[in-house]
């Protein structure tokens, strides 16, 4: 059973930074495409960033590119999301996701991922 556990969320002032972590266990992490999503109150879960198996390819939501950086450490079975220049509109629960099925393209929707963490709250105050 694959398990994903996020950490690193919290309260930060606008303009600040946070680094989220997602530790994976129970599966072949190094073969998974990994992603980060977020969900604000009353809104649908939205794609934030994704990274391929080796970490050589990343992709981001257009509105976030330049402020957020996703990376992975396969030796530690962990993915990271570095978030800089945070804004109040970044406030949401952030979820880590994993895709075990092979893909030739970059998955960006909820249905394209197979495993999910429980989420970590990020709150940005103005």
Image (cartoon, grey):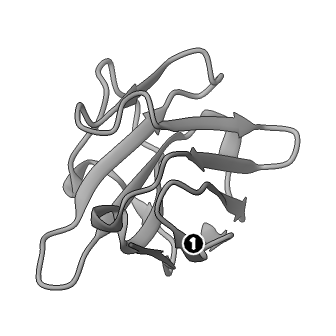
Left or right position of 77 against 98: right
Residue 20 coordinates in the image, percent (x, y): 63, 59
Which residue is more in the foreground, 49 or 122? 122
Which residue is more in the foreground, 89 or 104? 89
Compared to residue 74, the image places residue 11 above or below, namely below
Residue 88 coordinates in the image, percent (x, y): 34, 67
Compared to residue 47, the image places residue 116 above or below, namely below
- Residue at 13 percent across and 70 percent down: it is 44
Marker count (numbered): 1
For label 1, the SS is strand
Q: Residue furthest front?
A: 126
Residue 96 coordinates in the image, percent (x, y): 50, 61
- Residue at 32 percent across and 18 percent down: it is 104
Residue 73 coordinates in the image, percent (x, y): 78, 38
Sort mark 1 into few (<14), some (14-19) or many (20+) by Cα contacts within 10 Å.
Answer: some
Quadrant in which the N terminus is drawn: bottom right
Left or right position of 78 against 16: right
- Residue at 51 percent across and 73 percent down: it is 117
Which residue is more in the foreground, 91 or 37? 91
Mark 1, residue position: 12
Left or right position of 91 against 5: left
Which residue is more in the foreground, 50 or 64? 64
Asked if residue 28 shows in the view, the reply is no
- Residue at 60 percent across and 15 percent down: it is 56
Asked if residue 45 shows in the view, the reply is yes
Q: Quadrant of residue 5?
A: bottom right
């Amino acid at each position: 059973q694959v398990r994903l556990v996020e950490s690193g969320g919290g309260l930060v002032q606008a303009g600040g930074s946070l680094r989220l972590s997602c530790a994976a266990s129970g599966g072949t992490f190094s073969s998974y495409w990994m992603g980060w999503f977020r969900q604000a109150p009353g809104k649908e879960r939205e794609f934030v960033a994704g990274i391929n198996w080796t970490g050589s390819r990343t992709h981001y939501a257009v509105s976030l590119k330049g402020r957020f950086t996703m990376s992975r450490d396969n030796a530690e079975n962990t993915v990271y999301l570095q978030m800089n220049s945070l804004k109040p509109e970044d406030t949401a629960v952030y979820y880590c996701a994993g895709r075990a099925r092979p893909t030739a393209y970059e998955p960006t929707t909820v249905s394209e991922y197979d495993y999910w963490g429980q989420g970590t709250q990020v709150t940005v105050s103005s």
